[in-house]
């Protein structure tokens, strides 16, 4: 089964690249980060302290998660409600980073996406896909970019969407703080798998990145 694992820091464009390559190469796109975002969003909305391991474990038992696909791609349903429209914000991204340090959360998410990878040829992105979730994937790619470039891209997204935002320096600081948390968390810290291909996109356009990843997929799928 062809599985493609894409890792990298937040804001590196992993999800966008994976989605486009999935379409071009006929793969099923699985956004594992969306599951963590959904869990963080829902628990926080219920008043759960998402930094309290015991409280998170208790709240997690009440959440039933499901991935489903529509014309616009992957959606995440929690207890029968599609939460996808609410989980693509910087704030929810920070929540995802915090809940992902808890073992029960990771176990729940990994069980969902590993089953998907067993049944379908998939491409998925996150921060530990190649190192923990799919360690035997035939193709692992670590996509990154400088924190300044990632902040610039994020700022443009917020401006286009007409959403509140700070300065470039504010967004960059948030990204660097998130990087630090992800790289220093006790469980499955962010790092490049030993056999992953490093792809720095700082000076590349989106089309150039997609082309490079598609070539990698063709090479491993010969």
Image (cartoon, grey):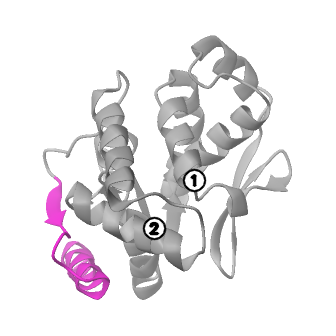
Number of marks in the rendered image: 2
Looking at this view, name the residue that lies furthest to the front: 167
Q: Position of residue 90 (x, y in %)?
A: 52, 52
Would residue 216 be found to the left or right of residue 134 on screen?
left
Q: Nearer the viewer, mark 2 or mark 1?
A: 1
Q: Which residues are magenta?
A: 196-222
Task: State the residue at coordinates (77%, 35%).
Answer: 63
CA neighbours of label 2 inside 10 A, class few (<14), some (14 to 19), many (20+): some
**Residue 121, numbered circle:** 2
Q: Position of residue 41 (x, y in %)?
A: 68, 42
Which type of secondary structure does the marked residue at label 2 adopt?
Answer: loop
Would residue 52 be found to the left or right of residue 131 on screen?
right
For residue 138, which quarter of the picture? Answer: bottom left
Q: Position of residue 92 (x, y in %)?
A: 59, 47
Would residue 137 be found to the left or right of residue 52 on screen?
left
Q: Is residue 27 magenta?
A: no
For residue 153, which quarter of the picture? Answer: bottom left
Q: CA distance from mark 2 to mark 1?
A: 19 Å
Residue under label 1, please give it.
Answer: 34
Q: Is residue 12 visible?
A: no
For residue 39, which quarter of the picture? Answer: top right
Looking at this view, name the residue that lies furthest to the right: 80
Q: Which tag, 2 or 1, sits closer to the chain's start? A: 1
Which type of secondary structure does the marked residue at label 1 adopt?
Answer: helix
Reply above or below: 5 against 96.
below
Q: Is residue 72 visible?
A: yes
Q: Quadrant of the C terminus?
A: bottom left
**Residue 209, numbered circle:** none
The residue closer to the viewer here, 135 or 210, is: 210
Q: Position of residue 146 (x, y in %)?
A: 19, 59
The residue closer to the viewer here, 161 or 181, is: 161
Task: State the residue at coordinates (70%, 33%).
Answer: 44
């Amino acid at each position: 089964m062809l599985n493609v694992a894409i890792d990298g820091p937040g804001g590196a464009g992993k999800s966008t690249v994976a989605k486009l390559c999935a379409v071009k190469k006929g793969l099923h796109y699985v956004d594992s980060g969306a599951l963590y975002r959904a869990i963080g969003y829902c628990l926080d909305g219920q008043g759960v302290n998402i930094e309290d391991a015991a409280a998170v474990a208790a709240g997690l038992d009440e959440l039933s998660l499901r991935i489903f696909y529509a014309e616009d791609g992957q959606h995440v349903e929690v207890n029968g409600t599609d939460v996808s429209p609410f989980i693509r914000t910087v704030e929810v991204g920070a929540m995802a980073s915090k809940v992902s340090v808890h073992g029960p959360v990771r176990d729940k998410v990994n069980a969902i996406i590993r089953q998907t990878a067993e049944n379908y040829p998939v491409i998925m992105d996150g921060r530990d896909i190649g190192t923990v979730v799919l360690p035997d994937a035939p193709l692992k790619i670590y996509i990154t970019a400088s924190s300044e470039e990632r902040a610039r891209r994020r700022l443009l997204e917020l401006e286009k969407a007409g959403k509140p935002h700070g300065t470039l320096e504010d967004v960059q600081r948030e990204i660097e703080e998130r990087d630090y948390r992800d790289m220093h968390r006790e469980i499955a810290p962010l790092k490049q798998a030993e056999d992953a291909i490093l792809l720095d996109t700082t000076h590349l356009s989106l089309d150039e990145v997609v082309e490079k990843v598609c070539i990698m997929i063709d090479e491993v799928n010969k």
